[in-house]
Amino acid sequence: MGYSEYTKHELESEFSALKSRYNDIKSMNLQLNMARGKPGKDQLDLSLGLLDVINSKSNFVGLDGMDIRNYGMLKGIEECRMMFADMLGVKDKNVMVGGCSSLNMMFDTISCMMTKPIEEGWDAWYKVEDRKFLCPVPGYDRHFGITGYYGFEMIPIPMDENGPDMDMVEKLVSSDKSIKGIWCVPKYSNPSGVTYSDEVVKRFAALKPAAKDFRIMWDNAYCIHNISDTPDKLLNLYEECKKTGNEDLPIFFCSTSKITFPGAGVAAMAASEKNMKVFTERYKYQIISYDKLNMLRHFKFFGDYKGLMDHMNKHKAILKPKFEIVLSKLENELKPVGVGKWTNPHGGYFVSIDVAEGTAKRVVQLCREAGVIMTDAGATYPYGKDPQDKNIRIAPTFPPNDELKIAMDVFCVCVKLAALEKLCG
């Protein structure tokens, strides 16, 4: 029986019992953190071999015959470009391997289009006073941070189990030339875990933007991060755009940040030759080359794309039990009382939950006071403002499993307590 069916007396009795339990939790002086999607220690240990894979006796001549230790190769070493091409489903000629952060490459990409026209005959974006960007919600706060930094008006686009509302996207993009792009995490979206359906990908490929400099920021951060034995499949946007003659629309991103070492991995972007010419023209003034030794280190560690996927199976073995802990706690604690609606992703790094409307901030506050740090409520919306104050992102990956169980117990108590506070007035 859900809380909505409780009598006033039953609600008050349940509230009193939960309040007592909550106070007991506070007395434990917990210090648990589920704020960001960081790999846990067991995952980081998987990549320790990276530290030894090259040494003073290694061969530093790459496939193209150049000495990797020296200047040059702005777009990265060929070995790494081929590996990322397989990951993104594009041609290696379209790939640029950058530093350690795909977020940095996304920031630089927006920065480039702010100051230099990406499309001949169109202004650089800084000249467009009312520039806008589409933001599927709930979504990735750091994406919104980039376009917020550059002064874009950010328009929320609702997400469902198939991806963004494409009726809304198509209508806005085709009618307003001040809309310059859209953020997308197409596979195991952050935070919902949704993978865009084939229809959604095809509709993206067939867009007819009023602004010819409109670009799809296709952040495929979790393209190989499966946790299920029946992983989702994402249609190849690159191939679909070739069919529609829209090869210039998408810009692809990925990295090894959650595969090897965050902050010491390798990032990559891919785009049409026309787009890439504009970007590399900018990059050649910014840097001579990124860390090619780190690129070589990663390539030698994995060997090839198959080796990379074998490595991801080791991550899966660690992550799958963590997601099972989260989902079982939500099923056992929240479902019986009808509080909350959550996703059951087949991969990625997060579980998205909608708690009782108007209580998300209160839930996060209660968790923090009980010693469990969560991502701020509202972070999954532009400007940090969730209009219904209900979405919370759960990041299960970092805590050890025994701590994760405790953290989820605390979280469920806080979700129920906040709901009862509202119901009891």
Image: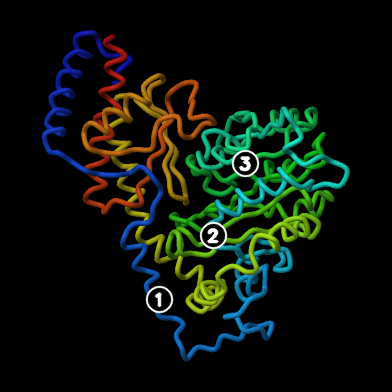
In the picture as drawn, the residue positioned furthest to the right comes out as 121
- The mark lying in front, picked from 2 and 1, is 1
| SS of the residue under disc 3 | strand
Q: Quarter of the image for the C terminus: give it.
A: top left
In terms of sequence position, does the residue under pointer 2 or pointer 3 come before the other?
Answer: 3
Q: Mark 2 to mark 1: distance in Å? A: 18 Å
Q: Is residue 34 left or right of residue 75?
A: left
* Tag 1 residue: 51
Q: Is residue 321 left or right of residue 50?
A: left
| SS of the residue under disc 2 | strand
Identify the amino acid type marked 3. Answer: Trp
Q: Quarter of the image for the N terminus: give it.
A: top left
Identify the amino acid type marked 2. Answer: Ser
* Tag 3 residue: 183
Q: Position of residue 340 (x, y in %)?
A: 38, 28
| Badge 2 vs badge 1, beta-carbon distance below 8 Å | no
| Tag shown at residue 102 | none
| Tag shown at residue 255 | 2
Residue 27 image-quadrant placement? top left
